[in-house]
Amino acid sequence: MKRRSKILIGFTAAAVAGTLGVLGVTAATAATAGPITGLGGKCVDVAAASTANGAAIQLYDCNGTTAQSWTAGNADNSIRALGKCLDVTAAGTANGAKIQLYDCNGSAAQQWTASGPALVNTGSGKCLDATGQSSANGTRLQIWTCTGAANQAWTLPGGTTTPTTPSAGLNPNVAPGGNFDLSIWQLQLPTGSPGSPTQIPPSQLKGANGYVNPAYFFTDKTDGSMTFWAPEKGVTTPNSNYARSELREMNADGSAADWRLAGSHKLSATLRIPSVTKNVCVGQIHLGTGGTSTKPLLELYYRPNGDIVLGTENSPDGGQTLHTVGNVPLGVQWSYVIAVSGGNTIKLTVNGSTTSYAIPSSFNQYGMYFKAGSYNQSSSDSTTNGAKVKFYALTVSHG
């Protein structure tokens, strides 16, 4: 069979390895002590230089005291001052949960990962935030859904900002279609009317001046990534309770992709997730024509604790088996390859490590198609909680 490829933008193996090395800052960076500065040039400060558990963490004029000397780059991803740790009160995960000083205990409430200029809390998937976007002395620090705003930008000890992802040749000044060949994808957004979310066809997505939605689908100006945002509250399809901002594979002629398992099929991606509430699906093989099922063959999930989990469907009638296949800290770039081989085997590769799974014969009657983006796996009345997913490379091939 003649091989046909749909290439969006690719990394060499060396480039991916190099990028992962740059982003592994929490593991590779030596511990460094000094001030952490934020909005208005103010310093992260322990109120009244108190060493008591529960002491408030605030913004304050920089004064060089030990109450403003923080050690970052620790092996356990903690940030420390006065012998204690930067901590989310009561291990909270809700927007507005306050930051305090507390005995170091290794919990996720005390783990922080650099994500661009932000510091993301592992336990909540939310960003260190100056309350009310205020730089006044005494402004309490809290966690909040990552927004990229100035009140979530921090400079770490040593005078360097938290590192951003290398652009890998992406142009931050064009629409996603200027960096990625979106002529073989259709976009679904969490907008529209109930049961009928907005669909953007390939003809509108492609090109440097292609479709952009500033809230849900756009090029990140700091790194050129194709960025998807899916809140917990949004318009969904009739068969799902969860909102999504996600690409659906199409054919070059604009028709819906609907390939059979025989042959070889591959979806490859390089991405990072700077924020997620509970769980987000970042890649799928979904069932197409051939029967009545609306299930996926598989879904690849990412969780706030860094776990990467593959869900394989037991049959077209339902029932999913979960497999933990890796762990990457929140905000750190990683890669995956989802491949179908020989019509009966799924091969999943995460950061170079491959595992294989048998495909039940009950799926043979169905056509298939790939999906990629942010398919948030939690729902509520919140439009600020959700999952943001940033893609730096995406490749689809069939043969």
Image (cartoon, rainbow, N blue to C red):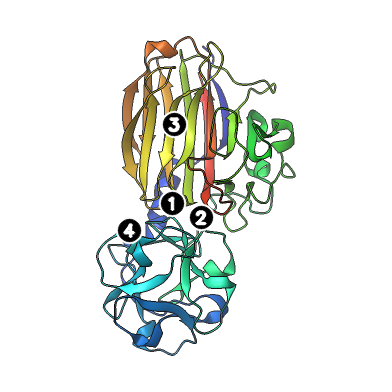
Say what amino acid the circle numbered 4 marks.
Ala
- Write down the quadrant of residue 259 in the picture: top right
Query: Most extreme residue toward the front, as rendered?
Result: 381
> On residue 166, which mark appears?
2
Mark count: 4
Asked if residue 371 is positioned above or below residue 233 in the image, the reply reads: above
Residue 177 visible to the viewer: yes
The answer to whether residue 48 is left or right of residue 180 is left
Q: Given this view, does label 4 or label 3 mark the residue nearer the observer? A: 4
Circle 4 — which element? helix
Residue 170, x across and y down, in percent: 59, 49
Residue 324, x across and y down, in percent: 31, 37
The answer to whether residue 76 is left or right of residue 169 is left
Crowding at label 1, few (<14), some or many (≥20) Cα neighbours within 10 Å? some
Disc 1 from disc 2: Cα separation: 7 Å
Say what amino acid the circle numbered 2 marks.
Pro
Asked if residue 28 is positioned above or below residue 323 in the image, the reply reads: below
Q: Earlier in the sequence, mark 1 or mark 2?
A: 1
Q: Earlier in the sequence, mark 3 or mark 2?
A: 2
Q: Which residue is mark 3?
A: 299
Crowding at label 2, few (<14), some or many (≥20) Cα neighbours within 10 Å? some
Circle 2 — which element? loop
Say what amino acid the circle numbered 3 marks.
Glu
Crowding at label 4, few (<14), some or many (≥20) Cα neighbours within 10 Å? many
Q: Which residue is mark 1?
A: 19
